[in-house]
Structures are given as structure tokens and as C-alpha cells.
Image (tube, grey):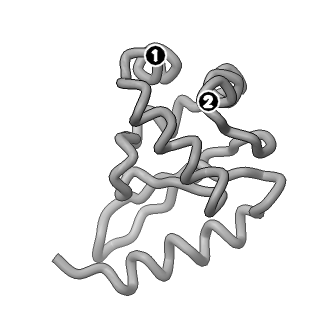
């Protein structure tokens, strides 16, 4: 499912997502990379391999999600070679803490 959605994207968006993962090791459904929570929840190794065709150079990508009473759920994918789950948790916690409408 996620792979089918990725395949339907314009090349520029795929390159933008791959570049973001290379630069900061994560992307979330609250960034402007086009990811939805459903895509993130269904991320798999085929998606990793497909993004490599658009410049992704990192390791295996894992998914993460957390629900916040004051914000709702936030989902992210992250490069496991450069980031751990506790690290992505801190990043998302900080994002929610600093979020303003």
C-alpha cells in the first residue's frame, strides 16, 4: 500500500523525502514531505529500497507513532543507523511541546 502511494508521487517529492531522511534521519506526517499516518504505519523494507532509487543512502527505516492528549497522534519514519527510538521520541515530544497553530 505505502509503496503504491510512493510510486504515484512526482519524482521531486520522492527526492525531497530521501534528502530529508539523509540530512536529518527522520520525517513525520507533520512535515511537508507528503507522508500520511497510514503510509508511515505500513512502511516496509520495499519502501526503503524504493527510496534508494531517489537518493536515500541511510539504513533500515523504522516507523514510530505516539499519541498526545493535547495534540493527537504524530507518526514518523526514521533511519535506524543514525537514530534510535528514544531519540525520535524526544524529537516528536519537542515538536508537540513547541507546536502552535
How far apart, in angstroms, are the residues tagged by discs 2 and 1?
10 Å
Instruction: Determine which quarter of the picture holds residue 39.
Output: top left
What x and y, as percent, mark residue 14?
Answer: 47, 33
Which picture quadrant has residue 25?
bottom right
Task: Write down the quadrant of residue 62 in the picture.
Answer: top right
Mark 1 crowdedness (10 Å alpha carbons): few <14, some 14-19, many ≥20: some
Q: Which residue is mark 2?
A: 51
* Vertical relation: 95 (above or below) 84: below
**Residue ID at (46%, 54%):** 28
Above or below, comparing residue 69 to residue 75 in the picture: below
Q: Which residue is mark 1?
A: 7
Q: Which of these two is toward me, 59 or 45?
A: 59
Q: Residue furthest bottom?
A: 98
What residue appears at the point 51 percent right and 37 percent down from the top-left corner? 15
Give the residue drawn at x 29%, y 70%: 71
| Left or right of 6 in this view: 69 | left
Q: Is residue 96 above or below residue 9?
A: below
Residue 7: percent from the left, percent from the top? 46, 16
Q: Which mark is residue 33?
A: none
Q: Element type at marker 2? A: helix
Q: Classify 10 Å Cα crowding around label 2: few (below 14), some (14-19), many (20 and above).
A: many
From the top left corner, tell me how far across and down residue 84 is, in percent. Answer: 77, 63
Amino acid at each position: 500500500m505505502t509503496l503504491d502511494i510512493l510510486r504515484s508521487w512526482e519524482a521531486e517529492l520522492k527526492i525531497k523525502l530521501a534528502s530529508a531522511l539523509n540530512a536529518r534521519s527522520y520525517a513525520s506526517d507533520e512535515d511537508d514531505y507528503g507522508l500520511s499516518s497510514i503510509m508511515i504505519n505500513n512502511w516496509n523494507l520495499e519502501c526503503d529500497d524504493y527510496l534508494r532509487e531517489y537518493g536515500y543512502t541511510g539504513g533500515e527505516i523504522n516507523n514510530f507513532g505516539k499519541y498526545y492528549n493535547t495534540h493527537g497522534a504524530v507518526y514518523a519514519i526514521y533511519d535506524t543507523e543514525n537514530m534510535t527510538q528514544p531519540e525520535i521520541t524526544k524529537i516528536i515530544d519537542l515538536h508537540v511541546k513547541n507546536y502552535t497553530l
